[in-house]
Amino acid sequence: MIAEVAAPETAPGPVIDELVATLERDGVVVLPELIGERQLAAMRQSFEVRLQRLRWNNFDGYEKERYRHVVQDLLTLDQGFVDLTLHPIVKGVLNRYLGNRFELVEAKGWKSLPTRRDFHGWHGDAWYDQSVAQGIPREVKLAMYLTDVRSGAFNYVKGSQRQQHPRIIPNRDVQDVPQTQISEVLGRAGTAFLFDTSGTHRQSVPILEPRCALFYNYHDPDVRLEQDNIDHYRNLTACSACALKPRCTSDKHKRLKRWEHEGVLDKMQARLDRMPEAMTIRRQTVEHPFGTLKAWMGNTHFLTKTLEKVKTEMSLQVLAYNMKRMINIFGVNPLMQAIAA
C-alpha cells in the first residue's frame, strides 16, 4: 500500500517534508484530508449536475466517451474545486517537487462507467516534446475521489517515475512486477493523492460501480508541449498597458493557446462567412443517400447486433447504394469496365 501521512494539526512543514520524500521515492503519495464533508458534498453535487446532460455548443455538460463521461473546467463548478488547488499542503508539496515555476494547466474529472474492459491501461502521460526535451521534465497530477472507490482504483508502479519518456506500456511489460511494488489507491470519497505522471500507472479493472474522480495537472508552462501542436503566446508589454486588461484577466498577463493548424479552421470559417448557404446546399446533397438508405432498411434499420457487425452491415448498405448510383449515372458496361481497370 502507499505510505499515508497523518494530517497536520499546526504547521505543515514536517508533514510536507515527509510527503515530498515519499513522492520522490515512490512517485505517488496519498495526502491527508484536504476537504471537509460539507464542502465535499457541495463539490459532488455540482459535479453530478454537470453530468445530467451532454456538452453541446455553448451549453455546459459532460463529454461522452465509451467508458467514461468527462467534465471539463472544474474550477467553474464550485468553490471547493478552487480551494483544493489553494490548499497549503498541495502548494507546499508542489513547490518543493516542481519548483516555483509550475502552473495549473488542466482541471477536469470523469465518471468511469462499470466495465471489465481494460480501456485505460498501463502508461505514462505524454505531454512534452520528447525530441527537444533535456531529460524528463517533471509533471504532477493531483487526484481526488468524489465517490467511494472499492474497485477500479488507481494503480502506480512505485519508483517508475522519470525512468523513461512516457509512453503506452503493454501489460506484458508489467506482469513480472511484484505486487508489493504496485500501489493501489482505494478509499472513500475525499481521498486525495499526488503522482508523477511519467511513472507507469493505470485505472485498474474491473470497475464494478460508477467512479467519479477529479484530476488537476501541474507542470512548468515553459516546457515545450508534444507535437499536438499547441503554440503559446504572451506579450508582457502589451498586456501591462492594455486598457481592456481588467476585463480580460486578473493575472499579470494573458497567455493564449493556439493549435498550429488553427489557420485552416479560420480559413474554413471565412469561406462559410462568404457563402453562408454552403451548409444548406451540403444538407440537401446528403439528404438523398440517407433518405434512400433509410427507405431500403425499413423500420427495423439494422438486422445485426454489436458495433462491429453493425459497422459491416452499414458498409454493405453504402456499397450497394454507390453501385446502384453509378449504374444509374454511367450504365452497367462502363461500370464493369471501370472496375476491371
Image: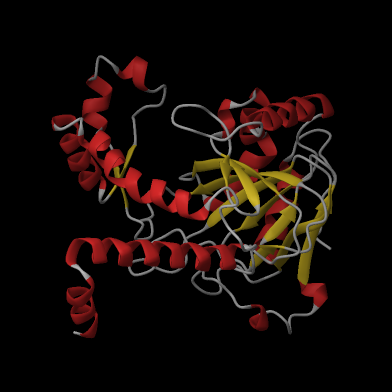
**Number of numbered labels in the structure image:** 0
**Between 133 and 10, which is closer to the camera in this rendering?**
133
Q: Residue furthest left?
A: 274
Q: Is residue 41 left or right of residue 198?
A: right
- Image spot of residue 38 (x, y percent): 81, 24
Image-quadrant location for residue 3: bottom right
Query: Relative to 325, does residue 98 appear above or below in the rendering?
Result: above
Q: Is residue 273 left or right of residue 253?
A: left
What colouring method underlies this structural image? secondary structure
Image-quadrant location for residue 323: bottom left
- Image spot of residue 129 (x, y percent): 37, 63
Residue occupying the point 82% across, 74% down: 180
- Image spot of residue 205 (x, y percent): 76, 64
Residue occupying the point 44% across, 63% down: 317
Q: Quadrant of the N terminus?
A: bottom right
Residue 285 shows in the view:
yes
- Image spot of residue 294 (x, y percent): 47, 49
**Between 26 and 78, which is closer to the camera in this rendering?**
78
**Between 242 and 71, which is closer to the camera in this rendering?**
71
Image-quadrant location for residue 200: bottom right
Query: Relative to 67, does residue 45 appear above or below in the rendering?
Result: above
Residue occupying the point 53% across, 47% down: 218
Q: Is residue 285 left or right of residue 18?
A: left
Q: Quadrant of the C terminus?
A: bottom left
Residue 97 shows in the view:
no
Residue occupying the point 32% across, 55% down: 229
